[in-house]
Structure formats: C-alpha cells, structure tokens
Image: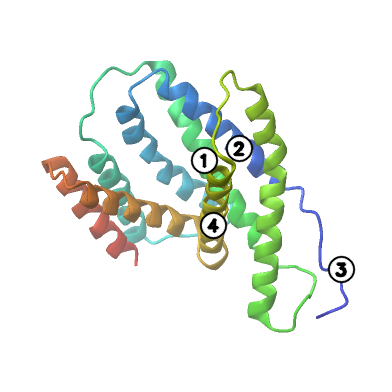
Amino acid sequence: MNSEQPFKVRWGFIVNAGLYSIVNFLTYQITSMIEPSIYSVLIQHKLIWVVMFSLVLLKKSFSVQQYVSLMVVCIGCMLVKMSNVDGDISASALCLIVLQGVCSSLASVWIEKMMKVEERPKVFEDESRQKLYWFLSDSFQMYMFGVPIYLAGSFSADQSVNIPMSLGALLVTVGVSQGLALGAVFVYHSSVVRSLVAAVVIVLLAVEHGVYSVEIVSGIVLVILGVIGWV
C-alpha cells in the first residue's frame, strides 16, 4: 500500500444526494396527482436525459445505431408499462415528471462522473485493487452525504412507520447491496448501461407477471432488439 493520502472527502456527492432527495419528493407529489400506472409509463423518458447528460458532462459520443437502439428501448419500456393505464394527466403533473426525469438522469450521470475521476492518489500498485478501493470509498461517501437528508425527511414526515428492527436492518442491507451493484455498473461500465440493465429488469418482471397483451409483447420485443442493437 502506498503512503499517499488514501482518503479524501469528495464534496461533489452532495449534488447527488440533493438530486435524489428531489427525485424522492417528486415521486410522492406526482403519484398523488395522477395514477401510478400513467406515471410508470411517462417516467421511462428519462433514458433520453441520460444520453443527453452523458454527451454534455462526460463528453461521450454514440453511433447512429446506438441512438436508434436507445430510442427503441425507451419506447419498449413505455409499452411494457402501458397495461391498465387509465385516468387523466394535468400539465403540472407532466412538468413534474419531466423535472423528475431530468433530476434522476443527472444524478445517474453525475455519479458516473464522480466515480470515474482519472487523477487519484495512488493507494495500490495493482490497478484492479486501486479501482476497487476508490469504488468502495466513493460508495461510502455517497451514502454518508445522503444520510442527513434522508433523516431530515424521515423526521419531517407526517406519518410514522413502525417496523421491527430486524426487518429495518434487512431493508437497509438490501438497499446498500443494490446501491453497490449499481455503483459497480457506473464504475466499470456507464450510466447508459445502467439504464439498459433497468430496462431488462422491467422486461423480466413483465415476463414473471405472466400478462401478455399486445402492448407488453411489443414492448418486450423492442427492448430486446434495442439492447442487442446497442451491444
């Protein structure tokens, strides 16, 4: 292990914590204004914002085939989520959905930007151990910056939730494991790949649900074709 300073507070993760707090707040507001089924369809547009922020913040470039594939995946996710969609949507709810899509996508790309900083103190000579160390360090800081915001939200909530300590610990463990898995995707791949993984999960859940309407089947096919086209 090298003698350079192995730990440095990365204040940029405050941006990520703030964005996710906005996303969580907007989820509550939007689902109280429109049917959750409509919301689950329209929020799929955030894949478009992920691509746009990747172009601006990460200076990435995509081929025409990849652009088309991502649009196909986005449309496919919307179709899969389109079963049992009913009810009206107001202009204000639509604006909030777009705002949430922007914040969620920006948070995703921002994490990738923070975790892929090239200039790091040399902790290990081995490159794989070096990358793993900073991945775990970044993940820890990302969660720590979010804790005060989530605690403030919990204490300011109108309703109290009483759950057993063991169940609470299990939920935290599952949440942390999920976060680490997603963080690994950001470090070793990209936020766009993370969005594609989320699309595949949507398809798997639809298959498990066992309801095969024309919209769902069409959506599943489009997602599969889009993912193949991307690869």
Residue located at (24% from left, 43% from top): 80
Q: Are marks 1 and 2 in contact (CB under 8 Å)?
A: yes
- Residue type at mark 4: give it: Ser
Please give left or right for residue 2 compared with residue 66 in the image: right
Viewer-nearest residue: 46 or 143: 143
Residue located at (31% from left, 28% from top): 38
- Residue type at mark 1: give it: Ser
> Which dot marks residue 19?
2
**The residue tagged with tag 2: helix, strand or loop?**
helix
Q: Earlier in the sequence, mark 4 or mark 3?
A: 3
**The residue tagged with tag 1: helix, strand or loop?**
helix
Quarter where residue 103 is shown: top right
Please give left or right for residue 149 compared with residue 1 in the image: left
In three-dimensional space, the C-alpha distance between marks 1 and 2, rounded to whole angstroms, equals 7 Å
> Which dot marks residue 104?
1
> Which dot marks residue 177?
4
